[in-house]
Amino acid sequence: MIHISEVIETNKMIEHENLDVRTITMGINLLDCADSRLDVLCENIYRKITTLAKDLVKSGDDIAREYGVPIVNKRISITPISLVGGSACQTPDDYVQIAKTLDAAAAKVGINFLGGYSAIVSKGMSRSDELLIRSIPKALASTQFICSSINVGSTKTGINMDAVRLMGEIIKETAEATKEKDSLGCAKLVVLCNAPDDNPFMAGAFHGVSEADAIINVGVSGPGVVKYALEQIREADFETLCETIKKTAFKITRVGQLVAQEASRRLGIPFGIIDLSLAPTPAIGDSVADILKEIGLEHPGAPGTTAALALLNDQVKKGGVMASSYVGGLSGAFIPVSEDQGMIDAVECGALSIEKLEAMTCVCSVGLDMIAIPGDTAASTISGIIADEAAIGMINQKTTAVRIIPVVGKGVGEIVEFGGLLGYAPIMQVNGFDCSRFVGRKGRIPAPIHSFKN
């Protein structure tokens, strides 16, 4: 039974500590939409999405109003579209037509983003996969709601370096194709290793082939709640610190569980998972970086940062997993630069570099996220950064990703504004030494020895 003190405490977290449910994401299987005729395929896709998700936004808004819990985004994830469009698409432009159909469906149902313009190429690229990848720059330049993700590696298969090399080029082309909007297309494109099938967060969300026909996944947030809790125990020892984070994560996740179950009931679609990641926003007081400072760092990037982040991530998982019947997605702590005011401050004062962020990704959710770099950065350098992150994910059996934005026409120290939840970011320095001979090698980096567990 819920005690009145819990209700009061939750209200306080919402009103004063930036607690919210970051997203309700409906996953939709589009495999049954496949057809060799492109126009029929697009019609099938549009009909299925607009039918299944017609009440998604209304239900989310109703739940938010009735329960007093802010629900920031309503989103859709779909089957990786390279699996759906293979028989109908003969050129990259055919895939762009599908992207426009998906965009129209997203606009019709009123969601914020649609993820799944994706391909899984960790072991090799099919013709369909490559056509989709080559369509990405034009697709993201000509749509508003579409997010794209490419999985280039896994612990089981190794890293597809042909795909890594191609994605460096595609990111550069996407930046150029959207240069009038400060290369915004790259903010909707992520390259992953060990991508999960049930991630509700963009830009990496897609509906995996192991999932049911449709599911409801919910992503919670709440960095401000954790920060406030730690402010009350500033001189405490590590045991108290860890227990406080763990208990706070439990409370945050319980709110997400309530919203997920209610959305599932109202929409008549099974509940999938809660992603209990601490997802920051540009708002003051809603920052993972501020939690690290509260733990005892002057700025993220100071010595001890990786240890503090590892502690935070572990306790969030331990607390959250007890609060939900099903936990999945990424679940931990996000460290995007542009979406976290504390991270932006750390970059601007010189405390945080890409190299330190890379070290931090060894122990947190995702990877190098929403990082703006000079527009003249070489494609091979971007591919090298992707390879480094994929290697961390492959060896450590975790999800890692790169969402990096080479902003055309801008250099180190300049600022790029993305707006909304995407925030703004200072252009960061990239190591200028050449890696083109390395990323130019053909083939695949083999899976690590510890992947053989059959």
Image: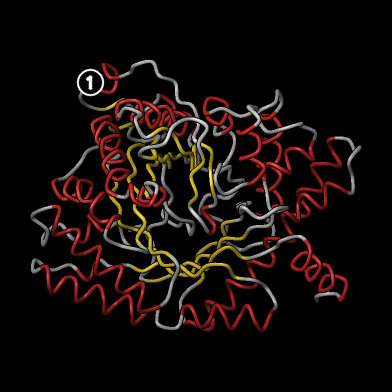
Picture residue at 69% right of the left edge, 79% below the top: 67
Q: Give the colour scheme of this rendering.
A: secondary structure
State whether residue 276 is above or below residue 242: below
Q: Quadrant of residue 221?
A: bottom right
Residue linked to disc 1? 441
Left or right: 256 as drawn, with respect to 117: right
Q: Secondary structure at mark 1?
A: loop
In this orientation, does residue 272 appear?
yes
**Rendered location of residue 327, percent (x, y):** 57, 57
**Rendered location of residue 343, percent (x, y):** 63, 40
Point out the image quarter for the N terminus.
bottom right
**Rendered location of residue 398, percent (x, y):** 49, 38
**Rendered location of residue 335, percent (x, y):** 58, 42
Picture residue at 89% right of the left edge, 45% below the top: 233
Q: Quadrant of residue 421?
A: bottom right
State whether residue 249 is above or below residue 167: below
Q: How many marks?
A: 1
Left or right: 289 as drawn, with respect to 160: right
State whether residue 263 is above or below residue 212: below
Point out the image quarter for the C terminus.
top left
Q: Residues within 10 Å of mark 1 (few under 14, many from 20)?
A: few
Left or right: 27 as drawn, with respect to 244: left
State whether residue 396 is above or below residue 252: above
Could you tell me the amino acid type at mark 1?
Arg
Picture residue at 36% right of the left edge, 72% below the top: 106
In the image, 373 versus 304, the foreground residue is 373
In the image, 239 versus 412, the foreground residue is 412
In this orientation, does residue 210 appear?
no
